[in-house]
Each structure stands twice: as structure tokens, then as C-alpha cells.
Image: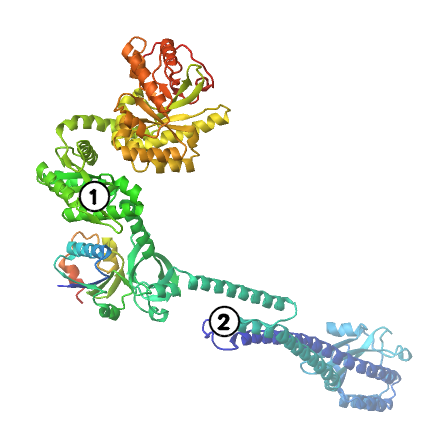
Amino acid sequence: MGKYALKLYVTGHTPRSQQAIDNLRGILEAEFADRYELEIIDVLDKPQLAEDEKILATPTLIKELPPPLRRVIGDLSDRDQVLLGLDLRTVGEGQPDTSDGGSHHD
Amino acid sequence: MALGLPLRLPFHLPFRLTARFTVILSLVLALLLALGGATLAVQYRQAVIAAKKDELRHLELGLLASLHTLMNTGKAGLIQDWLGEVRSHQGLTRVTILGRDGEPAFRDLDTLRRVNDYLDQRSFQRAPRPQAAPPPLAQPRFRQALAGDRTTQVDWASDRMVRLLPLKQAPSCRGCHGYTDAETLGVLRLSSTLSEARDRVHGAYLESAGFAALVVLLTGLAAFLLVRREILHPLHRIMTNARRWRDGDLDARVPDRPADEIGTLGRILNDMAARLERQLHETRNLIAQSRTGMVVIDAEGTILFANPAAARLMNRPRAQLTGSQLGVPLVDGQKTEIQIRRGNGESGVAELSVHTTEWDGQPAHLVTFHDVTERQQAEADARHRALHDALTGLPNRVRFHDLLERAIRRAAAQGNRLAVLFIDLDRFKEVNDTLGHAAGDELLRAVTRRLREAVRDTDVVARMSGDEFTILLDGIGDRDKALDVAEKVRRHLAEPAELSSQTLTPVATIGVSLFPEDGEDADTLLMRADTAMYHAKEAGRNCAHAFAADQGEAASRRFRLEKALQRAQANDEFRVFYQPQVGLPGGERKGLEALLRWEDPVDGLVSPADFIPLLEETGMIHEVGEWVFRRAAADLRQWREAGQAVDRVWVNVSARQLAADDLVARLDRLIREDDLAPEHIGIELTESGVAGDIAHSVAVLNSLRQRGFQIAMDDFGTGYSALTFLRQLPIDEVKIDRAFVQGITENREDRNLIRAIIAMAHGLGLPVLAEGVETADQAELLAAEGCDAAQGFYYARPGPADEPARLRPGAGPRPSGTQQEQ
């Protein structure tokens, strides 16, 4: 069964950062329940990590699994845009099911 | 074909055109040569034949003559000569004599020789004359030839030429053959080869054809070179430059040429390149100098292009940006905001918008963003400023109101109580006036600190205006708890405060109201806390009072009225009426008293007694009072422009206005901004208004007189009326209250009182004006008692500024109606 591994880079504990985190968590909880891993990285706390990833602006969201690697920027407020941007097209399917995850497994 | 060849092959295109031109030119030349050759061949053939014909004609004349002679004379010896002559013509291959029947009579030279032998043996003359008719002529061609039409047959293929010549009977031989003169005896056929005639003509023609071909080829070559020099080479130069332009080198220019078509084309292209270069330069400059960051990314979010502003905004070298991952921007609607690391290394906010575009023919996004950090900061600051007091940093009235409303909603939902404390600093104005505003500000800051210290962090402390503060106590137990806190605040405030120049002890009066008991909305709670504070003040300052139920009824009515007054102010329902004051005993107009009226759109004019006290209580009197001054100044100006001299307009100033710190400041502003002329303005104050804080009142009145305002003591006799009090005050006139005037014609005591007041005022050097004069008797009596001026319905009722009759100077006393009230 496919796991979703995501990294969200934010800058500081600002309301904007928190908004992005909340938005993303909302989407992930609704779509992938407990099948995702989300790592939140504050570029102020870990500048080297951000540098390694070459983060140019925040919030930046990187989907590492399932392939392909996808990277989007924005406040992540629009659920459909986020899913589309990450190439996680469960939009309009009612409920994401395991076969969707499986199809990404290869 | 063009597609099959790689474009980068140099000289491919010019060679193609040259090759095409060469081929075409060659074809044309070949065609010309072929046509010339063909024409030449025909002419050559004809020339060969003509030459042969000529040659044969010469021969055949001799042949015929000799043959005729031979035939006719029958001299066999002559045939030798004839043969010799025939043999000398090598071109002749065969000589045949044909009979009329077409059968050869003498087939060739050998046969002819035999003929000669035959003729030797038997003379023609001896030949028997045929008796029968001669046989018919054989072949048509033959017949034609014999008919005298000599014909020549040329067989080009076998290189042969044949001529047929008719043989006729010579006149000398007439009758010897049995034929008539006209009849042909036979045919002489001469066969000849064309070869030597051909050889002869051939040489001449070869020579001229070669020459012609040479001319044609040279002309073609010249044309080719000319085209190459004049067209192909210039085109090639243009093409070379065009290729450099294509590759981005817009500096390249086509060499100058004469102003022919190609030269013009070159110049046009040069101009075009220059224009493109300029535009490109300008566009590049725009993009390079733009403060807006511009980034082009592909569908995966990889940066394909970034301008310097983008590099600056993202704090990275441009070279590093290109090729790195920005990410696909998720833009909600038109714009979104992202956080960036700015040039100074700090985090900032950029507003970002995305447009679909193309880059190198591939779909791409143009992402533009600009730094809005400062703008957002400024907006946040402005928001904070709008909701906070600049001096103390506390929430202001608007903010407090908002917070209170929220707290009320919360408390209502949770069934909690909350309390509002309304705090007014006692005698704060004195600090400002005596120690200066800097000290006042310092005191306010000290008070702010103490207020904050006195309450929990979760409680809201706000500054409402000058020296008024409020505190919101959320989740307070009951009225006693709230009063406890209020008392604690009051005590905490009342410690001496070390200011930079002075030690001061702030003293405050506090009113308390409770949700939900005293009101269920912010306005009511605030108003009732204010009312409680006001009552506390009246009860003696420096104390805390809770709102009491008996204040509630009045408060509720007042609250409605207050709302109506606010609406009245907003809707411009207040009016200023003027009532003239006249001198006694002459009745000349001295001045006008400005009277505030409220014209309710529904109820009509509202009694001043009903609303003016509330204006004072709510503090609206400050603004409305100022408005009266402004109105009076404007009306005064208008009257003067209309040529009506008005000596002075008297404006009422209430106790609350007088007590406020800013009365003088407000009037100063009016003098400055509204051309308020103090020398034409009088200020009427009531006794009770002045009495509250004598020292303060004296100070204010002195300031006002310094500015040129006259001061009148209104409603004199109703208040304290202490003589010493009258002496202390810097005033210019005394106005006797209408209550005394009404009774003077019937009541002896009143008359005595009036007399005493007038005497007392005159003793202090103050003129006296009587209010509420309604009858001629009253006017007469007052004049008799030495009263200096009067005002009342007897002279004129108060009216709007635009009733000129009322304002006409010298409009003397006139009888009025029976209305008893003003």
C-alpha cells in the first residue's frame, strides 16, 4: 500500500506559516488519513536543510513519495490545486482508496 | 529537398540559387544553340541543293545542246566530244536516256557508247519514219518532266540528286522521226552525288555556326557573372547578416550599397535590426531594472529565466537561480503571498502572480512577484494606530468597544459576568495647564503603567479620551468583586508618581457597570459605567462607584435620547436660532443670543431643556458647542457681507465645556480656521457652570478675555450668587434670570431683588441685561430700575439666521403675542 511522504518548508512561526500547515494537514487528513508522513521544516531553524533543498520561497511543499517528485509553492489554501499540483489526483473520486495508492506503487 | 539538407551547411543557399541560375541559363543557351543549329541545318541543306542545282544547270545546258545536236545531226563522231564533256563532271554518277515509254534507251555511259556505235552505223536521218502514232508517255512525274517542267529530285539520305530533262526534236531533224516538234522524244536523266557540294558548303557553315555559338556562350557567361556580382553576392551578404541576427548578434549590419533594390533592402533590414536592437535593449533594461521579480518556470517548476530583481528578492545569484527548482506556484485566484528571504537575510513577504506563457516554444509560467513586506508592515502599523492610542499604546475607544462586544458574546455564551470600569483622572487638566503637556503625557503614561499593573494580564485596559480610561474585567464574580478591583485600581493609582520634573499623585474616580445586570451591550455598559463615574464625581471625587439601579431608569431613557442626539448630529438636525438683545430704555439692538435648537424630523422642535443636559452628560456638548460657535461665526460673516452690522453674538457655554481641558484650544482653532472673531463673540456661562472649580474657571475665563471674548454671567440669581463669587470672576455682563423678571410687575419682592442685583452689578461696574421680557410693562419697569439691556418675546422671538427683519438694526420694541414660553 502506497505511503505519501511530504515535506513542508515554512519560515518561522508566523500566522502565515501556521495557516499553510493547517491547510495542508486538513487536506492530507481528509484525503489520505493515516497513510501519509508529513515533515515540517522551519528554514529559520534548519537553514542548512533548506539550503540543501534549495528552497527559494516558503511555504514550499515537496512530495517525495510516491514518485514523481513534485514541488509546489503557495499558501496551500485550495485543496484541488494542491492535489493537482502534487499529482495526487483523487479529486472528484469521492473517496481515495487503496488501489489509488497501489497504482502509484511502481 | 530543402528539408533534407542541413541548414548549417555554408554556401548551400547561394549555390542553390547559382546552380539554378546556371542550369536555367545553360538551358536557354542550349535551346538558342539548338534553334540556331536547326535553322542552320535547314539552310545548309538548301544551300547544298542550290549549289548542286546551279552546277547541274550549267552542265545540263551544255549536255542538252550537244545531245540535241548529236541526235539531230546524227553525227556519231560528236558523241565522243559529248562523252568527254560528260566525263569531266565527276559529280555525275549515272546518265540515262529514257524513251517515251519510260524504258531506258541508253542506260549509262557504256550504253551511250553503244549508242554512239549504233549511231555510227545508222544515221538518224535514215531511220524509218514510224507510221503509227507514238506510244503514250509513261509515269506522271515523267510526263511532267517531259511536259517541259524540269524537275529535280533530291534524295538526301542516299546523297543523290536526280534531274530529268526532256529531249525534243531539233528543227533540223523535223520529220525524221515521225513526231511533231512539240513532242518529246525521250528523257535525259542525270544522277549526281551531293557530296562535293556538301563538302564545299559545310566548311563555310561550320565556320559561321562556331562563331555564333561562341557569341551565345560568351553572352551567357557575361550574364551569369553580372547576376552573380549584382544580385547573388549582395543577397549572400544580406543572408550572412540575417543569420547573425538570427543567432542574436543584432549589431551586425549589411554593408552599404547604392540605392538600388538590393541596397534599399539592405538598408531596410539594417533599420529593422537597429529597431529590434533598440527595442530589445529597452525591454531588457525594463526587465533588468524592474523592481518586480520576474521568473519564468517550466511545467515542473524549474526556473528557466530570472531577472535581477528576482535574484535580489530571493537573495541568490541569478546564475544559481536558473535551473533550480522554484516549485509550481499554487495561485488561488489572481494572487498569492509567499515568504522570501530578502537581500538583508531577513524573511519577507512577496505577492506573487502567475501568467501562462511560452518559453523556447514550450508552455511555461511567468511568475512575477514583488516585495510587500514594508507595505504590509505599514498596513499593520496603520491598523494598530487606528485602534490604539499613540501616547500610551493602549487600545483606543474603537478597539475597546470591539473587544467589549466580543467579551460580551463570550460571556453570554458561557453564562459569565464581566465588568466595565470607567476611570476618570481628577484635575488632570490642572497638570496640563500648570506643568505643561509633556508632564501631562508623562502622567498619563505612569497611569497607564499602574492600571496595567493593577489588573490581570487578560483584562483589557484602554484609553477612551484625554484623561478617561476603561478596563474590561472578564469573568468577574459579582458586583462586589468588581468594586473590589475598582478600589484596588484606585488605590494603586493614588500612590505618588515620580515624574521627571515633579512628583504627582494621580487621583481617579471610577464608575463600574456589570454584564448582564447593567446592560447587555457594549454601548449600554460603557454609558452606565460612565454614569456611575459621574455620580461618583458628584458624590466627591477619588472614589469608585458601581452603577445603581435607580440610575438605570434615567439611564435607559437617556440612552435612547442620546442615540437620538447622535443621529441628530449625524443628520444635521441641530439649528442655531438668534434672539436680539436691545438697549434700555431706547430699544436699540445691541447683540444677538445664539440658541441651540433641535429640529427632529418627526417631533419638530425639541425643547432645549430636554436635550441640552444630556448633551452635557454624554460629552456631546463639546462637539455640538463647537459647532454652534462655527455656525455663529459663519452667520456673522454672512450678515456682514449683506451689510448688516451685528455688534456681537452671544454663545452659551456649558459647565461641561468649561470644565473640559480643551475649551480654549478649541476656540483658538476656530479663530484660526473659521475666522471666528473674538471681538464679535460673547460667551454666556451659568453660575453653576462656573462654580464647580472656581480656580479653573477663573483661569479659563481670563484666557478667553485675553483673546477678546466678552463674558456674560447667565441665569444670574438662580445659583450660588455669592457676592464674593461675582467679584472673583472676570466677566463683562450680568444676565438676570427670567424667573425674577416675570414677577416684577406684580411682586414687590421681585422688584426689590432686581433693584438690588442691578445695584450690586453696577457697583462692580458690570452692565445688566434682563432675560424673558414679555410685556411693555416689564420693559418699562426694568428701564426705570436702571437695567441696561433686555431680551425676550416682547422684542423678538428667537428665529433662524435668515429672517432679516429680526436682525434689522434698530428694530425697536414691538408688541408680541401672548406666548409665555421661549
**In the rendered structure, the residue with mark 1 lies on which chain?**
B
The chain that hosts pointer 2 is B
* CA separation in Å, label 2 and label 1: 81 Å
Q: Is residue B645 above or below residue B150?
A: above
Residue B310 position within the rendered picture, expressed as x and y whole percent measured from the top left: 36, 63
Q: Secondary structure at mark 2?
A: loop
Residue with the mark numbered 1: B506
Residue B434, horizontal then vertical, whole percent: 30, 42
The residue that mark 2 highlights is B249
Depth check, front residue: B726 or B216? B726
Q: Nearer the viewer, residue B655 or B401?
A: B655
Residue B610 is left or right of residue B143, and the answer is left
The answer to whether marks 2 and 1 sit on the same chain is yes
Q: Who is closer to the viewer here, B229 or B649? A: B649
Q: Residue B660 in the image: x percent, y percent?
A: 29, 35
Of badges 2 and 1, nearer the viewer stands 1
Mark 1 belongs to which amino acid?
Answer: Pro
Q: Quick check: B431 above or below B790?
A: below
Q: Is residue B195 visible?
A: yes
Question: Which class describes the residues within 10 Å of circle 1: few (<14), some (14-19), or many (20+)?
Answer: many
In the rendered image, which quarter contains the C terminus of chain B?
Answer: top left
